[in-house]
Amino acid sequence: MIWHHRFVKLVTVFTVLLIAAGGMVTSTDSGLSVPDWPTTYGWNMFTFPLSKWVGGIRYEHSHRLIASTVGFLTIIMAGWTWWVEPRRWVRRLAFAALGAVILQGLLGGLTVLFFLPAPISIGHAALAQVFFCITLTLAVVTSPRWKKTGAVSPVDDPMLRRVAAITTLLIYTQILVGATMRHTNAGLAIPDFPYAFGHVIPPVWNARIAIHFAHRLGALIVTLAIFATTSHVLYHHRGRRELVRPAFLLLLFLSMQVTLGAFVIWSGKDPVINTAHVVNGALVLGTSLVLTLRAFAGSGVLGFWGSAVRGSGVRGSGVRGSEVQAEVRP
Amino acid sequence: MFRNYKAIAFSILLAATAACGSDSSKSAQPASPAAAPDAKKVDPATAAKISGKVVFEGTPPPNVPINTDSDPACSEGGKSDLKSESIVVDNGGLRNVFVYIKDGLGNKYIFDTPTEPVKLNQKGCHYEPHVLGVRTTQPLEVINSDNTMHNVHGMPETNREFNQGQPVQGMKNSVTFTTPEVLIRFKCDVHSWMHAYLGVVSHPYFAVSGAGGAFELRTIPPGTYTIEAVHEKLGRQSQTVTLGEKDVKEITFTFKPAA
């Protein structure tokens, strides 16, 4: 089981790498440098000569190869999880990851074949974060620590669950707005920071300025939400290391994210800074998700306790406080 | 479980439909106006001429050198000396401005469409020429003269978008455009600095400003016309010109740096 957990963590790390590679494709405007899909200039993707990885091709082709690797790893992860994991919902989640990665590949291909239409490209970016969240969730819930926390001392704090879950949802929404901004070329629609055309509120408006400003406004809302979550953790759960650590990490990633966002503007969308902003955004989301999951550990909401354990005859139930709800097969 | 598969299939279908829909809408534009039943050829004996100049007012921005290090083949045989071509000023004149008759010809005249292709060459990771014109339905031949990969990505608003790979030196692709459109941006996504601009018109009255910003439109039938000058960065300007028989008129367009 420990090797299974390590493998899931490996898939999660590769997913972050894949998000970085995707970020470089968009940031360098290389999305169409390979005009065909699933082939690469007529070659099989895996036999495309290294000598031809020039200019934008190196970003787009690397992204495709890393994506294929993640796809391959996800197949193994799903199969392995199915084999060793007693909890049905975890097994299903692993197969949801497989479905997501297949759909993600199709969206990536479609967006190339149809010249990067914004809805498909935004969908591709949105699903990337969903896939990352699924692999990360699997990594969290397959860890020995998760089982120990849930069994020994579940976090009994509905307020923390609520505020952490809302924060995670807000961060994901903010990432969606960011993806919309990237794929509608609105990244520099407001060219100055912290002001907007020298004002607090933009004096002129169009669709791109509105999207860009929504992302800045979203950053403010997310910041407040993260402050609310982390303050709650530090005030009420200072002794719980598994909550305090992600709370501090969340504050660190948040400060990095705001700084990177400012430098994206000041550098005129430097590709490396732009990509770092995308990757760090995923890390903000991931850290908030980990905190949320740990807040829910042992609550029964995730079905950790007694959820369909293969071979044990016990099917789908959860624990609400001390009351055990279980359906026992004859 | 089964419901999930249905949802995934539906999402794929939705995405494909959205993509197909957006593409077909671009090609649904009407073609150039059909000639009237009594339309005639232009009589060269009475035709007029416009010669002019595109002037750049102010200090032009420097044409910064382009870093081609991402593809060593772009600087084969020595260091690449490519420079940005967005604003090229020569003796006060602005080059690379597409000038054409935008309005006034109506459907009174018949113009033979040349079958000889207009050529756009990719050489030294650079488009030659930077701005060019082509007639509707006349072939545009795009050539890869480089020992490296290029993709030819045409980004029209009303004609059909395309993206063709040219992985081998000497490859040629032919493209035609059914609808007038000024200007269509071409880019190579492999080499992010490579851009060209194409004007597609339904008549022969177009030119690209050259040395000193000079241009010339010849063999124009007498009449009143809107002449438009379009620059890739500095936008559009137009003026109205009335031409009598055998007139030779001079006009000037003045562009200023963007604020």
Image: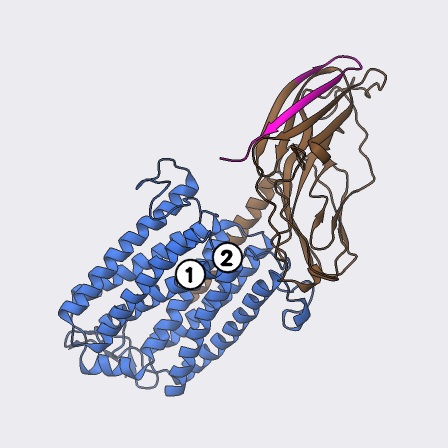
Chain colours: A blue, B brown
Q: Quadrant of residue A42?
A: bottom right
**Chain for numbered disc 1:** A
Is the C-beta separation of discs 2 and 1 under 8 Å? yes
Q: Amino acid at mark 2?
A: Ser
Point out the residue furthest to the top here. B244
Q: Amino acid at mark 1?
A: Val
Q: Which residue is mark 2?
A: A27
Image side of residue A240 versus residue B97, left or right: left
Q: Nearer the viewer, residue A127 or B186?
A: B186
- Magenta stretch bounds: B241-259
Residue visible at 42% across and 52% down in the picture: A266
Q: Position of residue A14 (x, y in %)?
A: 46, 73
- Residue B175 shows in this picture: yes
Residue A263 vs A241, above or below: the answer is above
Q: Position of residue B102 (x, y in %)?
A: 66, 26
SS at mark 2 in the image: helix
- Residue B201 shows in this picture: no
Residue B253 in the magenta stretch? The answer is yes
Q: Which residue is mark 1?
A: A278
Residue A329 in the magenta stretch? The answer is no
Residue visible at 42% across and 58% down in the picture: A126
* CA gap, disc 2 and disc 1: 10 Å
Residue visible at 55% across and 45% down in the picture: B22
- Quadrant location, the N terminus of chain A: bottom left
* Number of marks: 2
